[in-house]
Amino acid sequence: MRINYSVCYNESGDNLKDLFKIIFMVVLVIVVYLFKDNISNYIYDEIIYRGSNKVLTYNEYYTENNYLFVQNIDTSSVNNYQELLNMFYSIINSGDDSFSFDCNYDDCISQVNNLIKDEKIIANINNFVHPYNSFSSINIDIMNTGKITVTIKKVYSDEQIDFINAYIDKFISENINSSMSNLDKIKVFHDYIINNTVYDENGQNSHSYTAYNLITTGKSICGGYSDIMAIYLNKLGIKNYKITSENHIWNLVNLDDKWFHLDVTWDDPIASDGNQYLIHNFFMITSEELFNLDKVEHNYDKKIYIEAN
């Protein structure tokens, strides 16, 4: 027995389905257009940058130090220019590798763009943090939704940090005791670095600007001198930061609630006779004393390094 199956096509039913598809597509387009910002934010937050922190986390080298130019903040949005500067300081200071925040005021995006074009402001903010959290490069992504993501590559690797810490811890255990004043503790390390290091005249284009290079090669430029001193001071719990001028960098140190300049590099001069000299001309001096000695290489931005004024 043969059974023949017949299939009936409902032409009007197919047309109705096509109409529903068209209506659905039109509604979808309208919804996407009306809620495009919310959809963009969702894609940005949950898909593209879901790995970025929404709350700052802090590593062991974060400091609670606040300064006249920048202060720590604990938020994921900024409402004015000062908060924008504070946000960059807080992100770098925290030790996070990546963090996203929202711009909540009209000029925010343009001001972030200005900071990118004029790298000096963010580079100077880098001087207020522990050297281990300072960046060698910083990437800033701007979304038209007002979301800013900051990604940081740090100067020092974990292995280098371990090496430097062991070096300084050994020095402290062998040379520092509780009967010494903070000034004596600073001086003994100042002298030790100078007696065991020479200025690297050919190091401008190498890694000679790091504390790691200083203690592994015995050579450095001003960046290495100032970093090793800052790391040491932080271990002692002495408040400090670095100051940068156009072509030079040194330390500013808080002692007994007063700020003093400390320039290890210029106390380790290059002598024409080839001999090594240890001087204390730039050891814990006031701004007035500093400018009496040099007004060119130590001409820093007084609007940024306000404590030094």
Image: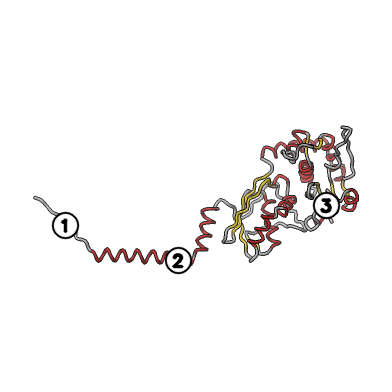
Q: What residue type is labelled 1?
A: Ser
**Disc 1 target residue:** 6
SS state under label 1: loop
Q: Vertically, is 119 above or below 268?
A: below
The image position of residue 301, as x and y in percent, is 79, 55
The quarter holding residue 190 reads top right
**Disc 2 target residue:** 31
Q: Label 2 vs label 3: CA separation?
A: 58 Å
Q: Label 2 vs label 1: CA separation?
A: 43 Å
**Disc 3 target residue:** 299
SS state under label 2: helix
Give the left or right position of residue 249, taking residue 15 as reference: right
The image position of residue 257, as x and y in percent, is 84, 54
Mark closest to the chain's N terminus, 2 or 1: 1
The residue at 45%/66% (across/down) is 31
The residue at 76%/43% (across/down) is 223
